[in-house]
Image (tube, rainbow, N blue to C red):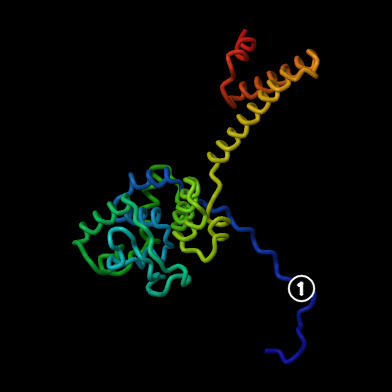
């Protein structure tokens, strides 16, 4: 607009606000949700949890793209606009597990056994408004059960995290979520689970104790060490092992328990 030199000098863009912590629903949370939600909210949550589809993709799912074994993502619905999915890579078929198949078949029977049209639709035949469903049905049910609501995308992150916890390879998770690259899947969608971190550190703790005990046994058969050296190493090992035992790191041996309890 200005036919002059740039009038802005010594300015810079403000630092963006740091992104908030995102949540991934655990399988335990999802099972609890499905046990308290009425229909069609339960089916909507089951689709979100067991396919990892985005909110717009959930609204755009069609019966003609579901064959009982997989469901194909071909479109997304934003408000009243039907469009292509987020990226070309987002198109694809997602395997349907038995639990989700049960929800879908019951939902289809309640809907009059349709073979075409939106899987989740309003009484007017339009894509179901998931925001209104969350506000009017899901949130009140969750509040009564003291469950948090983190939005529909938490189910997508949850699927990635739950598959990762079960040892599914990164590239397979990327394919199921239909990401363009595996870095997005692992860095953004897979969340650290505190229970897993605790279990990992417990394993490290036990391995450390085993290593100390092995070193003690090796030293005991080493003829170059004096009796005093061996006694000091045994004392160090017992003290280290005793500390871990007191902190419930592992179950100590009978030989160790005897002097501690007496």
Instruction: State the residue at coordinates (49%, 59%).
Output: 174
Report which quarter residue 228 is drawn in. Answer: top right
Farthest-out residue, left = 112
Farthest-out residue, bottom = 3
Q: Position of residue 164 (x, y in %)?
A: 50, 49
Farthest-out residue, top = 262
Report which quarter residue 200 is drawn in. Answer: top right
Instruction: State the residue at coordinates (46%, 56%).
Output: 156
Q: Residues within 10 Å of mark 1 (few under 14, many from 20)?
A: few
Q: Is residue 23 above or below residue 256?
A: below
Q: Nearer the viewer, residue 66 or 107?
A: 66
Asked whether, in this view, residue 103 is left or right of residue 1, the answer is: left
Quarter placement of the C terminus: top right
Instruction: State the residue at coordinates (31%, 50%).
Output: 98
Q: Nearer the viewer, residue 158 or 37?
A: 158
Q: Position of residue 250 (x, y in %)?
A: 58, 25
Instruction: State the residue at coordinates (20%, 62%).
Output: 113
Q: Is residue 257 above or below residue 68?
A: above
């Amino acid at each position: 607009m200005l036919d002059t030199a740039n009038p802005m000098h010594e300015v810079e863009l403000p630092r963006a606000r740091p992104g908030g912590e995102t949540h991934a629903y655990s399988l335990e949370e999802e099972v609890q949700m499905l046990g308290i939600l009425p229909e069609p909210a339960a089916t909507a949550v089951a689709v979100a949890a067991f396919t990892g589809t985005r909110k717009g993709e959930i609204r755009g799912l069609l019966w003609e793209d579901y064959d009982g074994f997989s469901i194909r993502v071909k479109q997304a619905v934003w408000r009243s606009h039907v469009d292509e999915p987020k990226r070309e890579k987002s198109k694809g078929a997602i395997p349907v597990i038995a639990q989700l198949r049960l929800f879908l078949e019951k939902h289809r029977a309640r809907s009059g056994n349709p073979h075409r049209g939106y899987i989740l639709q309003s009484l007017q035949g339009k894509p179901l408004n998931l925001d209104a469903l969350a506000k009017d049905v899901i949130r009140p049910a969750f509040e009564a059960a003291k469950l948090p609501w983190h939005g529909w995308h938490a189910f997508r992150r949850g699927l990635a995290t739950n598959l990762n916890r079960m040892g599914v390879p990164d590239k397979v998770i990327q394919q199921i979520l239909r990401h363009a690259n595996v870095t997005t899947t692992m860095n953004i969608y897979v969340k650290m689970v505190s229970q897993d971190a605790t279990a990992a550190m417990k394993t490290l703790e036990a391995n450390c104790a085993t290593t100390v005990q092995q070193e003690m046994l090796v030293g005991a058969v080493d003829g170059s060490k004096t009796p005093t050296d061996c006694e000091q190493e045994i004392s160090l090992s017992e003290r280290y092992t005793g500390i871990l035992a007191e902190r419930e790191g592992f179950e100590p041996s009978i030989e160790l328990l005897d002097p501690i309890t007496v």
